[in-house]
Image (cartoon, rainbow, N blue to C red):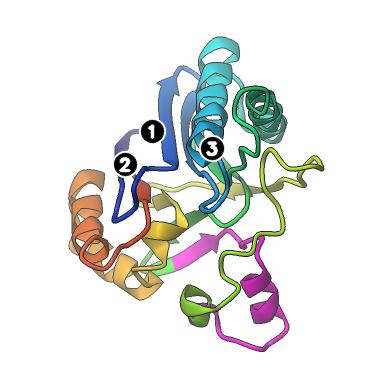
């Protein structure tokens, strides 16, 4: 299996970038993750970097597979807690994808998202751990209205909080032609799933697809925005 991978992070119109990302490839597969330090909380940038650095370290040093991804995220939570000694209040989301030989595992905490696209459709989309997502589940708003909902930034699960977070994990089958997108809310709030798919139909590798999506996002993005695009060959 061959993968084409591209990524970026941008400060947006914020004074600093609290997003972080990590990518790594090895004999056991590939790892891609995005973390978003909570805006309005002290030291968010230290939390996001601690989480992504820990996941990369674990993947490179211990070569974990999909079955260990959830435990790796829990160890990233512990890494964020250790940051509290010098960076009190550090909190972050995490969205991580382990990609192996025609299979994958997605894991997340918070509202950074993981998408899988196949045959012009959204095959998988992670479910946000947010108050706005609860409003969707209750039928009070549509999924698209999350992007402008007043409670969209109220998160129910984070790394580095007072309690150990419950990690959502999903095994995924993978086929040639599948596309994956891992991104922070500053990215997905500015682009619909329909636009993501429309830009994917133009073909091309992960870099060209991400460039097209980034061109749609950044003129409107006030928040930090970060994304990793993957195309499976």
- Residue 126, image quadrant: bottom right
Q: Which residues are magenta?
A: 122-144
Badge 3: few (under 14), some or many (20 or more) residues near its Cα, within 10 Å? many
Mark 3 element type: loop
Q: Nearer the viewer, mark 3 or mark 1?
A: 3
In this rendered view, identify the residue nearer to me: 115 or 102: 115
Magenta stretch encompasses residue 132? yes
Q: Is residue 201 visible?
A: no
Mark 1 element type: loop
Label 2 close to label 3 by CB (< 8 Å): no
Badge 1: few (under 14), some or many (20 or more) residues near its Cα, within 10 Å? few
Residue on which disc 3 sits: 43
Residue on which disc 1 sits: 1
Expressed as whole percent of the image width and height from the top left, the position of residue 124 reads: 54, 60
**215 relative position to 233: left or right:** left
Expressed as whole percent of the image width and height from the top left, the position of residue 221 reads: 30, 63
Label 3 close to label 1 by CB (< 8 Å): no
Report the Cα–Cα distance between label 2 and label 3: 39 Å
The image quadrant where one finds the C terminus is top left
Residue on which disc 2 sits: 233
Asked if 68 appears above or below 199 in the picture, the reply is: above
């Amino acid at each position: 299996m061959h993968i084409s991978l591209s990524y970026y992070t941008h400060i947006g119109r914020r004074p600093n970038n609290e997003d972080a990302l990590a990518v790594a490839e090895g004999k056991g597969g590939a790892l891609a993750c995005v973390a978003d330090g909570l805006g309005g909380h002290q030291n968010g940038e230290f939390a996001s970097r601690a989480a992504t650095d820990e996941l990369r370290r674990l993947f490179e040093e211990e070569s974990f597979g999909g079955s260990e991804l959830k435990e790796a995220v829990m160890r990233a939570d512990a890494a964020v807690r250790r940051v509290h000694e010098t960076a009190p209040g550090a909190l972050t989301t995490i969205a991580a994808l382990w990609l192996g030989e025609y299979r994958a595992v997605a894991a997340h905490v918070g509202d950074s998202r993981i998408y899988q696209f196949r045959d012009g459709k959204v095959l998988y989309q992670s479910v946000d751990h947010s108050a706005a997502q609860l409003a969707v589940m209750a039928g009070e708003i549509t999924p698209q209205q999350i992007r402008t909902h007043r409670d969209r930034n109220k998160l129910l699960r984070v790394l580095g909080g007072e309690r150990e977070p419950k990690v959502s994990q999903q095994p995924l089958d993978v086929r040639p032609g599948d596309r994956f997108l891992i991104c922070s809310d500053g990215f997905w709030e500015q682009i619909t799933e329909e636009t993501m798919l429309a830009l994917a139909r133009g073909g091309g590798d992960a870099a060209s697809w991400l460039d097209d999506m980034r061109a749609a996002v950044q003129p409107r993005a006030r928040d930090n925005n970060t994304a990793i695009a993957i195309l499976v060959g």
